[in-house]
Image: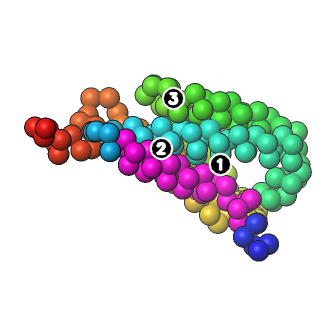
Amino acid sequence: MAALIGFVLGEFGFEFFVIGLIAAAISIAVRYRRGPVDASERLLAYYALFPVGCLYLVNFIYHVFFGAMSARFIGWADSPFQTELGFASLGFSLVGFLAWRGGYELRVAAVVGPAALLLGAAGGHIYQMMVNGNYAAGNSGLLLWMDVVIPLAGFLFLYLARPGRTPQVGASARVGSG
């Protein structure tokens, strides 16, 4: 049980990513029953809500209110920069929440900003592993992979939902039916 609790608390990036995919699938299924649905738009919207809005809200809470604990998890000493990272995370979170119901341009911002942070963090984690042998749970493993997978998925969802493509699932099945 302790291992499960440790996984849940330590891998919330993975969990919010999966929750976002599940929520998008449910939204697509519900909307599909009413008519054609833009699946790529739903994937992007729920990406903005969960792996950006919710994930960065939790990141804000961890770094601002539990800075020493989050620093130990990463394998670092506690620092005032924990608070600064926390408030940057709060900004990303707010953009994610706004982008969930916003338009494509706002969703671009919700993907690009956090992607820069996550990909940069992945590079930093790899550097720390190679140079300093830092294989702490918060510096390697699934967390490192999610620092790469989450932004790449966001860019994929942006591409799929871009303006000007043929977006709807189920449209051809319903054309001419009456």
The residue sitting at 65% across, 35% down in the picture is 93
Residue kind at label 1, given as amino acid type: Ala
Q: Which mark is residue 154?
A: 2
The quarter of the picture where the C terminus appears is top left
Q: Which mark is residue 91?
A: none
Mark 3 in CB contact with mark 2 (< 8 angstroms)? no
Q: Which residue is mark 3?
A: 101
* Residue 96 as seen in the image, left or right of residue 62: left
Label 2 Cα neighbours within 10 Å, binned few <14 / some 14-19 / many ≥20:
many
Residue 129: percent from left, percent from top: 70, 63
Q: Give the label, 3 or 2, closer to the camera.
A: 3
* Residue 22 as seen in the image, left or right of residue 87: left
Residue 99's place in the image compared with 40, above or below, is above
Residue kind at label 2, given as amino acid type: Gly
Disc 3 is placed on an element classified as helix
The residue sitting at 86% across, 54% down in the picture is 69
Magenta stretch encompasses residue 101:
no
Residue 104: percent from left, percent from top: 43, 28
Magenta stretch encompasses residue 16:
yes
The residue sitting at 71% across, 66% down in the picture is 7
Disc 1 is placed on an element classified as helix
Label 1 Cα neighbours within 10 Å, binned few <14 / some 14-19 / many ≥20:
some
The quarter of the picture where the N terminus appears is bottom right
In the image, 59 versus 133, the foreground residue is 59
**Where are the magenta residues, as a range?**
6-31
In the image, 77 versus 105, the foreground residue is 105
Q: Give the label, 1 or 2, closer to the camera.
A: 2
Location of residue 175 by image quarter: top left
